[in-house]
Amino acid sequence: MEKTEYEMQLESYLNYLKQEERSKATINQYRRDIFRFLSSLDTEVLTKEAAVAYKQKLEQKYRPVSVNTKLSALNSFFIFIRKKELCMKLLKIQRTAYCPAERELSREEYLRLVKAAEKRKNEKLALLLQTICSTGIRVSEVKYITVEAIDQGEALIRLKGKTRTILIPRKLQKNLKKFIHREKISSGPVFVTRTGRSLDRSNIWKMMKALCRDAGVDEKKVFPHNLRHLFARCFYSVDKDIAKLADILGHSSINTTRIYIISSGKEHRRCLDALGLVV
């Protein structure tokens, strides 16, 4: 079978993902990962040897977590085209007790980002940051923050075949109502572009990055998903109920939620020092 035929199957697979209501970002990522693999082939036939060789190249270039993400995309594609024998084992990754400090966004840094947006007279961005961080929603779920949801004080999130309700903090609800009134938004999504389209991951990412210098926050820490992680850590520090947090975040597995609440090495060291086991 020629490579072009596999590329045709790739398009069929991507259409399948759309029918499964996978997010646009996920579909684009799968397209890139699978296309790069197909483009790397030296032969016209897919073989396990070629797949394993590609895996080895990935291991030399990417971190284990990134390698597993790309392998998962390929394995899913192989199953779709009925080539399950080509599936590869994911790398075994030991769960870390804490996350790197250079990647963890602190509450103080988050507040500086909000203040920087306010100083720029960008009320929409300031409220957007607070909405994501105070509810724990995914950036792809921002479109569910509608005028109707603000009126009710809760948003109904429908994503990946699941439905969950997100409560909107009262103070945020009040501030968003004022914003909606000033902007004369009658219905639908609150956070939209000038043309009326819902802000997407790319829009929000660029808007957040533009605040880094004014806020004095390292760019490596500033991306939408880190706000969700900050929400998880703050919620767990108060409630200590990981099962409830998993429901709020929309996780099927508590193991996924555990990743969200690991803290930096600084906090880990404080815990070690507090043990008083060194004479």
Image (spheres, helix red, strand yellow):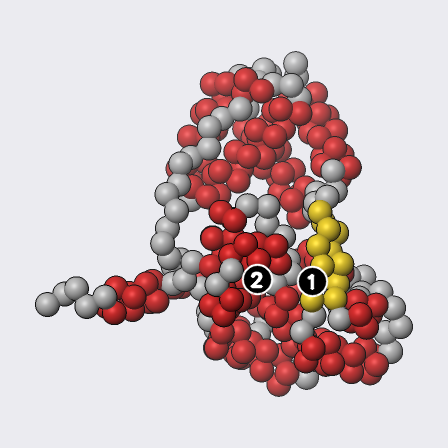
| Tag 1 secondary structure | strand
Q: Which residue is mark 2?
A: 228
Marks counted in the figure total 2
**In the rendered image, which quarter is residue 9 located in?**
top right
Which residue appears farthest toward the left when viewing the image?
279
| Tag 2 secondary structure | helix
Q: Residue at x 69, y 62 (%)?
A: 166
Q: Nearer the viewer, mark 2 or mark 1?
A: 1
Q: Is residue 42 visible?
A: no
Q: Position of residue 84 (x, y in %)?
A: 58, 20
**In the rendered image, which quarter is residue 92 located in?**
top left
**In the rendered image, which quarter is residue 125 located in?**
bottom right
Task: From this view, report whether residue 38 is shown above or below residue 221.
Answer: above
Work out which quarter of the rendered image holds the N terminus and state it: top right
Amino acid type, label 1: Ile
Q: Is residue 162 visible?
A: yes
Amino acid type, label 2: Arg
Q: Residue at x 35, y 67 (%)?
A: 267
Which residue appears farthest toward the right when viewing the image?
186
Q: Nearer the viewer, residue 2 or 55?
A: 55
Task: Tell me the crowding category of disc 1: few under 14, some 14 to 19, or many 20 or more residues within 10 angstroms, Cα based.
Answer: many
Name the N-terminal-most of marks 2 and 1.
1
Q: Position of residue 132 (x, y in %)?
A: 64, 66
Q: Position of residue 213 (x, y in %)?
A: 51, 76
Q: Residue at x 61, y 30 (%)?
A: 76
Work out which quarter of the rendered image holds the C terminus and state it: bottom left
Task: Tell me the crowding category of disc 2: few under 14, some 14 to 19, or many 20 or more residues within 10 angstroms, Cα based.
Answer: many
Q: Position of residue 218 (x, y in %)?
A: 46, 69
Cα gap from disc 2 to disc 1, whole angstroms: 13 Å
Q: Residue at x 66, y 25 (%)?
A: 80
Task: From this view, report whether residue 90 is shown above or below residue 200.
Answer: above
Q: Which residue is mark 1?
A: 166
